[in-house]
Image (cartoon, rainbow, N blue to C red):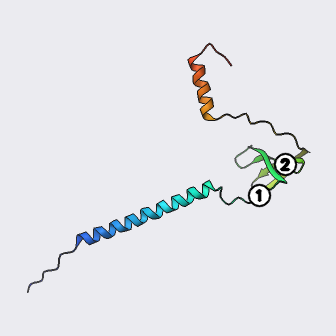
Amino acid sequence: MNTTTPPVELDSGLALVGQVAMILVLIIALILACAWVFRRLGGLHPSSSKLLNVVGSVAVGQRERVVIVAVGETWLVLGVASGQVTKLHEMPAQALPEPVAQSFASRLQHALKQQSNPSEKH
């Protein structure tokens, strides 16, 4: 008896693996593109309220923060911990200070200028 098996087509198997790999790459690219668009649009933030605004916050522990919230013409200083918000102080609203932080580029340029002119002090 002649029991010869037909040769297995290796090309069709490799082509199938290639198609699956391309589809996976396209799906991952689509997911990344959707994430980028979602980030650019700002996510699902509800419309900002004019009555309630977070003025500033600072971490005072691993899970604890002190937050200043503007409610109308009043500022509330709140202690925020896991599962708990405590009013620490209430005061009339004040004018917001001008932001002091500079961009990284301007700080780098200033540092390089100081390094090139060490006699100049600011």
* Amino acid type, label 1: Gly
Q: Secondary structure at mark 1?
A: loop
In the visual, does 70 lie left or right of 2?
A: right
x, y (%) of residue 88? 86, 47
x, y (%) of residue 113? 59, 21
| Quadrant in which residue 7 is drawn | bottom left
Which quarter of the image is occupied by the C terminus? top right
99 shown above or below 19:
above
* Amino acid type, label 2: Ala
x, y (%) of residue 43? 65, 58
C-alpha distance separating marks 1 and 2: 21 Å
Q: Earlier in the sequence, mark 1 or mark 2?
A: 2
- Residue at the top extreme, as displayed: 119
Which residue is at a point 41% across and 66% down the rendered structure image? 23
Nearest the viewer among 8 and 110 is 110
Which residue is at a point 87% across and 40% down the rendered structure image? 94
Q: Could you tell me how many numbered marks the image carries? A: 2
84 shown above or below 10:
above
* Dot label at residue 70: 2
x, y (%) of residue 39? 61, 55
* Dot label at residue 32: none
Q: Residues within 10 Å of mark 2 (few under 14, many from 20)?
A: many
Which residue is at a point 76% across and 45% down the rendered structure image? 57
According to the image, label 1 marks what residue? Answer: 83
